[in-house]
């Protein structure tokens, strides 16, 4: 009974983490297409729960009526529905998180952390909704956008911990588990190094949001023309972002090589290291395409998605081998 509940909860957490990644993709699409103000009010969109499909459906004075801080509202059906879709996906993910928390109540006594972490997710998702409104009414203030991303990464981290912890508990409770089988462990130094990589990757993501903010300002100033010159014009922000990525890549490669040297003793760690390197390779490829192909809009969400997947894998590595504990294969 308990084991079946754990397995169902594991599937629910997996669904939740997928929805969060979809939210991240949707938010990135909104940013890359300049659709952040597609709906100038919140939680409604042009004061309706289902946005208009044509300007004729809006009041004659809509530009003034829905203005934000003196800036007149603009209607673009594609941007409006892109932002509306983003909000809809966010609302669905919120419902999924609430459902996960309700299901986790049954673990309140046996595994209280499963419940409390799920409850914390509900609070954080509520905070994200409030921040989303603040972002709209601030005319997409860069600081609030970065804070919005920060809490998204915190939510991702909690979900990754739950995925790893629940899977470990399933393996521990499983009657098919070979109790005589030795568990793989790693020296604590490896987990500590990976924590450093997690911090560095998070910083790189925030640097990326800063680059995106500068591009937003520049593109608006140039009336979205001369796109091939944007990267050169933003200057130091992109240079830092690119240089930082080179250092992070080399450091990751060195760490993966160290794991490779002990792959016979640490096959699980080696699998994590391989996955991290593969994701980082495609992340770098996406960055190169953005840099040398005039920032194609379709690549930007992929770039951010790969960055957050990379961060998720790094966190999974740490949680799997946290404090050198003897835990079963995940």
Image (spheres, rainbow, N blue to C red):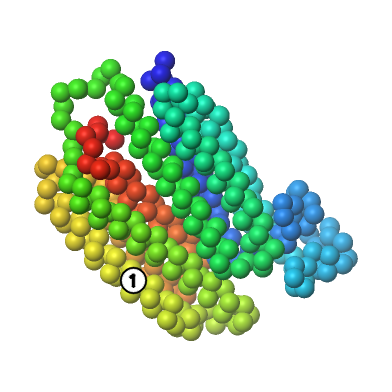
**Residue 75 vs residue 247, the one in the foreground:** 247
Q: In this view, does 215 lie to the left or right of 291?
A: right
Q: Position of residue 305 (x, y in %)?
A: 44, 55
- Asked if residue 89 can be seen in this view, the reply is no
Residue sitting at 48 percent across and 32 percent down? 115
Residue sitting at 24 percent across and 64 percent down? 251
Residue sitting at 64 percent across and 47 percent down? 88
Q: How many marks?
A: 1
**Residue 190 vs residue 296, the one in the foreground:** 190
The kind of secondary structure element at disc 1 is helix
- Asked if residue 107 can be seen in this view, the reply is yes
The quadrant in which residue 74 appears is: bottom right
Vertical placement of 79 versus 112: above or below? Answer: below
Vertical placement of 300 versus 115: above or below? Answer: below
Q: Position of residue 11 (x, y in %)?
A: 44, 31
Q: How crowded is mark 1: few (under 14 residues within 10 Å), some or many (20 or more)?
A: some
Q: Badge 1 is on which residue?
A: 244
Vertical placement of 59 versus 96: above or below? Answer: below
> Can you name the residue that lies furthest to the top here?
1
**Residue 124 vs residue 57, the one in the foreground:** 124
Q: Position of residue 148 (x, y in %)?
A: 55, 58
Q: Is residue 301 left or right of residue 74?
A: left
Q: Is residue 293 left or right of residue 38?
A: left
Q: Where is residue 285 in the image (x, y as percent from the top left)?
A: 35, 65
| Quarter the C terminus occupies | top left
Residue sitting at 40 percent across and 60 percent down? 202
| Quarter the N terminus occupies | top left
Q: In this view, does 145 lie to the left or right of 208?
A: right
Vertical placement of 109 versus 94: above or below? Answer: above
The quadrant in which residue 135 appears is: bottom right
């Amino acid at each position: 009974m308990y084991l079946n509940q754990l397995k169902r909860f594991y599937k629910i957490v997996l669904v939740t983490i997928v929805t969060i990644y979809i939210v991240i993709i949707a938010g990135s699409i909104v940013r890359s297409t300049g659709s952040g103000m597609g709906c100038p009010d919140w939680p409604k969109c042009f004061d309706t729960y289902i946005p208009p499909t044509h300007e004729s459906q809006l009041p004659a004075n809509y530009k003034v009526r829905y203005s934000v801080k003196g800036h007149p509202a603009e209607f673009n059906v594609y941007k409006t529905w892109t932002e509306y879709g983003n909000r809809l996906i966010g609302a669905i993910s919120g419902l999924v998180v609430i459902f996960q928390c309700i299901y986790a109540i049954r673990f309140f006594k046996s595994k209280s952390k499963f419940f409390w972490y799920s409850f914390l997710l509900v609070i954080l998702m509520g905070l994200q909704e409030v921040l989303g409104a603040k972002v709209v009414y601030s005319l997409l203030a860069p600081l609030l956008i970065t804070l919005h991303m920060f809490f998204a990464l915190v939510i991702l981290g909690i979900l990754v911990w739950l995925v790893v912890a629940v899977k470990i508990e399933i393996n521990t409770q499983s009657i098919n588990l070979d109790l005589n089988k030795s568990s793989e462990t790693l020296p604590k130094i490896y987990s500590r190094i990976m924590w450093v990589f997690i911090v560095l990757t998070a910083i790189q993501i925030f640097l990326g949001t800063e680059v995106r903010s500068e591009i937003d300002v520049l593109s608006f100033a140039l009336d979205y023309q001369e796109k091939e010159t944007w990267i050169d014009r933003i200057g130091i922000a992109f240079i830092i972002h690119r240089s930082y990525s080179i250092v992070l890549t080399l450091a990751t490669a060195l760490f993966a090589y160290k794991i490779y040297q002990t792959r016979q003793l640490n096959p699980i760690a080696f699998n994590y290291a391989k996955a991290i390197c593969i994701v980082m390779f495609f992340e770098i490829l996406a960055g190169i395409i953005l840099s040398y192909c005039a920032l194609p809009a379709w690549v930007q969400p992929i770039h951010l998605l790969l960055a957050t997947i990379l961060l998720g894998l790094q966190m999974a590595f740490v949680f799997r081998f946290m404090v050198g504990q003897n835990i079963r294969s995940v």
